[in-house]
Amino acid sequence: MQKKQLARAALVTFAAAALLGAGYLSGVRHAVQAASASAAATPATGGKIDPKTGREVLYWHDPMVPNQHFDKPGKSPFMDMQLEPVFADDAGTSGIKIDPGLQQNLGIRYATARRQDIAEGFDAVGTTQFDESRTDVVQSRVTGYIDHLYAGAPLQRIAKGAPIASLFVPDWLAPQEEYLALKRSGMDSSMLDAARARMRAMSIPDGVVANLDRTGKAQTHVVLTSPETGVVSGLNVRDGAMVTPGQTLAKVAGLSTLWLIVEIPESLALSVQPGMTVDAAFAGDPTQRFKGQIREILPGISTSSRTLQARLEIDNAALRLTPGMLMRVRVGAQKPASRLLVPSEAVITTGRRSVVIVRNGDGRLQPVNITVGKDAGDETEVLSGLTDGDQVVASGQFLIDSEASLKSVLPRMEGSADADPGAPASAPTANGVSQTYESTGRVEKVTAEDITFSHQPVPALGWGKMTMAFGKPSPTAFPDAKPGDVVHFGFRQTDSGYQLTTVDPVGGAQ
């Protein structure tokens, strides 16, 4: 009997030990599984997983106070809004990201930087002028009086050989009468030759002397004619005026050839050489085309237009052109060259530099400084800053500027490398007036005191997307704003909070 009790006690003790061992193993296994689950829920970086997106969260913050970090979500202690997560995959990225739907609504268009072999020629403008090398002067060689003036006024067209003025020359009468007297008295030929030489010395034309021999009558009038078909470019006398030897009565400018003066932009002055071909078209009729070669580069840059002038001759035998006509000119290239081109509208000129907005591989938009070269029609050459295949924003830059507040992003490109990237955004002032910020959003509520927007991020202030009320400068300000409108608005910080300065519908002004 005692043996049975001992056996039973041993069996109970063994069962209890077995149960304790099983419980210990189960507890260890549960602890390992819990530790594994905890390790899976907490990334190696110590962050947490956002249940909505499945992305790793570094911390939560209030966009209005971006430097204050929180280790869990909740309501902001600073404003009536929820804290927003900062994801690990966004850390260290550059540029801004805009919702694709908003990009489509804003009409943002992209273009690709591409290399192309284009000619070194360029477009310019020119004007026609008189060919001064073909200008003739009509002068008097004797002392006389204008008996009749055929040319009425300057710029009168005149044909070659047409009369300009008739002169009465009293001094011609005596030598001619002397010559006729010698001839009638039968003097020998040597005396007559001497009399003829005297008349030539007095500028009596050979035609007058020949007519004297033929008719036996002295001639005291001479008609001065035009040596060239063209225009009377200058007329310095009137009827009855006295003229003296060497005096210019008129100038005649020929029209069979004209000068074309091409205005070369100062930036292209060093690339222009004599001998370059020119194809010119009359601005009033593009079918009227004229070709030539640059004959010479005129010295000096115009201080008013900042252009260099090149001169060439163009044929005008048909007299289709007159001086002063505007011509569209294409200066021919010497040889093609490979250039990296972007649309000219994609280039933002800030005054001290040129910038394009580049779309990165992850869809973010980032401003990039570039060095621009020559213009080629509607495109601009990029010397540095871009590579072949880069995508740039070709339209809607000003909306991106509003969306991303690039007015504050772009100056940082020139900021000191020692600047603290974690420093809070400041609100610079100009002449004592607070800086104006801009964004795009939807109107949620309108009252007499303020307007509430659900707006996009404002990087200049470190804000993310949020819904916030902005004060109105007066109860009657922005009367066209109503809930549901998508607007572009500006605001500035005042002592009483953030106050609106502009509210414009997207796609047009109020």
Image: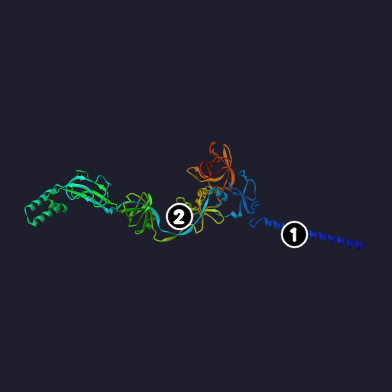
Residue drawn at point x = 16 percent, y = 53 percent? 207
Residue 196 in view:
yes
Crowding around mark 1 (Cα neighbors within 10 Å: few <14, some 14 to 19, many 20+) is few
Disc on res. 380: 2
Q: Toward the viewer: 208 or 196?
A: 208
Return the x and y of residue 2 as percentages of the image width and height: 92, 62
* Left or right of residue 222: residue 381: right
Query: Is disc 2 placed on a helix, strand or loop?
Result: strand
Q: Residue 94 appears in which quarter of the rendering? A: bottom right
Q: The residue under label 2 is which amino acid type?
A: Thr
Q: Earlier in the sequence, mark 2 or mark 1?
A: 1
- Disc 1 target residue: 29
Q: How is the image coloured?
A: rainbow
What is the CA distance from the residue labelled 2 to the residue labelled 1?
69 Å
Q: Toward the viewer: 111 or 288?
A: 288
Return the x and y of residue 498 as percentages of the image width and height: 55, 42
The furthest residue to the right: 1
Return the x and y of residue 508 as percentages of the image width and height: 51, 44
